[in-house]
Amino acid sequence: MSGIAVEFLKNGIIKIGKFKLTSGIESPFYIDLRRLYSFPSLREKVVEEIVKRFPTDQADVIVGIATSGIALASFIGCKTGKPIAYVRLDRKEHGTQALLEGEVRNKKAVVVDDVATTGGSLEHAISAVKEMGGNVMFSVVVVDREQGAREKLKSIGVELYSLFTAKELFKELYESNTIDEKTYKEIQEYLSKY
C-alpha cells in the first residue's frame, strides 16, 4: 500500500490547512475521499486492498453510509459480487419514509464509510441495520482519524477496521519528504489529543 498517501495528497484527497469537520472539531487537515472516485486506478487500489485485507466476502450485504460510503459500498459490492444497501443520514419524509434502502433482514452486513472521526455516522448506520433485522459483522473505513470512532463502535459490539489511520498516512507523507517536519509535528500534536 506504499505510496497511496502520496497519491491522496497529490490528487487533493488529503488537504493541509484549517478545516471544520462534520463532528464540529477543527482540524489542521481534511481527508476528502469523495474525490477518490475521480481517479479510477487509485480507487481500484483502495477497493482491492479493502477486499484483500478484510473478510467482506463473508458478508451477505455491503452497507454504505450516505453519501461517500454509498460509492465505496458499490465498488466493494461489485468486486465481491455482494448486494449493497445504504443508510440515509435522515429518514425520508415521503414515500416509504425509509432510513435504510436495500434488504438486510436476517443478513450478515458490513457497514462501510470513507472516513471515521467520532463514529457518530457509523453508529447511526449500525443502528439502522439492526433496526431492520440485520446483523453487523464489522465496519470498514478507508481512514480512521483515531478520534473516538473505534472505541464508540467497540462499546456497541462492532469492530472497526481501517486501511489507514491518520497517523499512518501522515507518517508516510513525512517519510517520503512530501510534507515538511513542521507540518508533520503540528498534525501529530493535533492527533495526540485523541
Image (cartoon, rainbow, N blue to C red):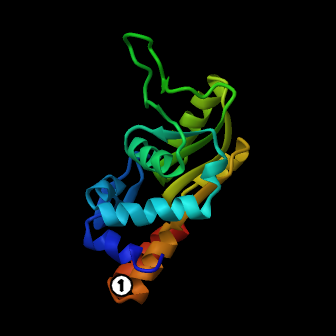
Give how far across and how far down residue 92 sits, in percent.
40, 18
Residue located beneath label 1 in the image? 182
Give how far across and how far down residue 155 sits, in percent.
72, 45
Could you tell me if residue 169 is visible in this image? Answer: yes
Could you tell me if residue 144 is visible in this image? Answer: no
On the rendered structure, is 166 left or right of 52?
left
On the rendered structure, is 92 left or right of 39?
right
Comparing 114 with 101, the one in front is 101
Comparing 47 with 21, the one in front is 47
On the rendered structure, is 172 left or right of 139?
left
Q: How many marks?
A: 1
Q: Residue at 35% across / 66% down in the picture?
A: 42
Label 1 crowd bin: few (<14), some (14–19), many (20+), radius 10 Å: few
Q: Quadrant of residue 35?
A: bottom left
Q: Quadrant of residue 30?
A: bottom left
Give how far across and how far down residue 167 sits, in percent.
50, 73
Q: Amino acid at mark 1?
A: Lys
Q: Residue at 67% across / 48% down in the picture?
A: 58
Residue furthest out toward the top: 95
Residue furthest out toward the front: 81
Give how far across and how far down residue 7 sits, in percent.
33, 73
Q: Quadrant of residue 13?
A: bottom left
Of helix, strand and loop, which one carries label 1?
A: helix
Is residue 17 depicted above or below 99 in this figure? below
Is residue 4 depicted above or below 69 in this figure? below
Quadrant into which the C terminus falls: bottom right
Q: Residue at 60% across / 30% down in the picture?
A: 129
On the rendered structure, is 81 left or right of 39?
right
Is residue 46 depicted above or below 83 in this figure? below
Q: Residue at 53% across / 60% down in the picture?
A: 50
Comparing 77 with 172, the one in front is 77
